[in-house]
Image (spheres, grey):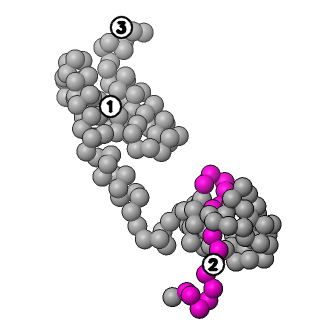
Amino acid sequence: MFEWLGENWWAVWLTAFLAFAVVEMITLDLFFIMLGGGALAALVSDFAGADPWLQIVIFCIVSLLMVAFVRPVALAHLKKGPAEQRTNVDRLIGEQAVVMEAVTSDGGLVKIGGDIWSARSAAGILTAGQMVVVAAIDGATAVVSATPPAEERT
């Protein structure tokens, strides 16, 4: 089997690419897909007739260049956008909530939209029924602060 793999490096690079793609789907970090790009470049060099040592060099160089130059740009494009495009818990920041159970710096419960969240106060004690604003999300806990009175809002 190793003899066959030594003669058919394309199978090694194709397997490496598929493995990196699967790991990337699990991690979603845009790192392993860059290594997959290096594996594809090595696969193309194998089809072009490059020696195995050159294929390995091409894999390393292309992977490093993609991690150094393509990944930061791709991450920047993924993370930019207006607040309306925020997803998941990031979308909750700035939303109003109702205190269901008194919230202190140690804990409590708030209702955000239709969901009950564990919460802690950014400052002071918040009483049941009080309107609050979600300042941050820390794990599964909403960090909330008191809503300013209507006349102070702008």
State how far apart marks 2 and 3 are (Cα): 71 Å
Q: Is residue 51 visible?
A: yes
- Mark drawn on residue 39: 1
What residue is drawn where x is 39% and y is 39%?
31
Q: Mark 3 is on which residue type?
A: Glu
Tell which circle, 2 or 3, labels the residue nearer the N-terminal end. Answer: 3
Q: Residues within 10 Å of mark 3 (few under 14, many from 20)?
A: few
Number of other residues with Cα within 10 Å of mark 1, as a class: few under 14, some 14 to 19, many 20 or more: many
The answer to whether residue 113 is seen in the rendering is: no
Q: Is residue 146 above or below residue 16?
A: below
Q: Which residues fall within the magenta stretch?
A: 138-153
Residue 46 in which image quadrant: top left
Q: Residue at x 22, y 31 (%)?
A: 61
Looking at the rendered structure, the secondary structure element under dot 1 is helix
Is-magenta flag for residue 132?
no
Instruction: From this view, report whether residue 138 is shown above or below residue 113.
Output: above
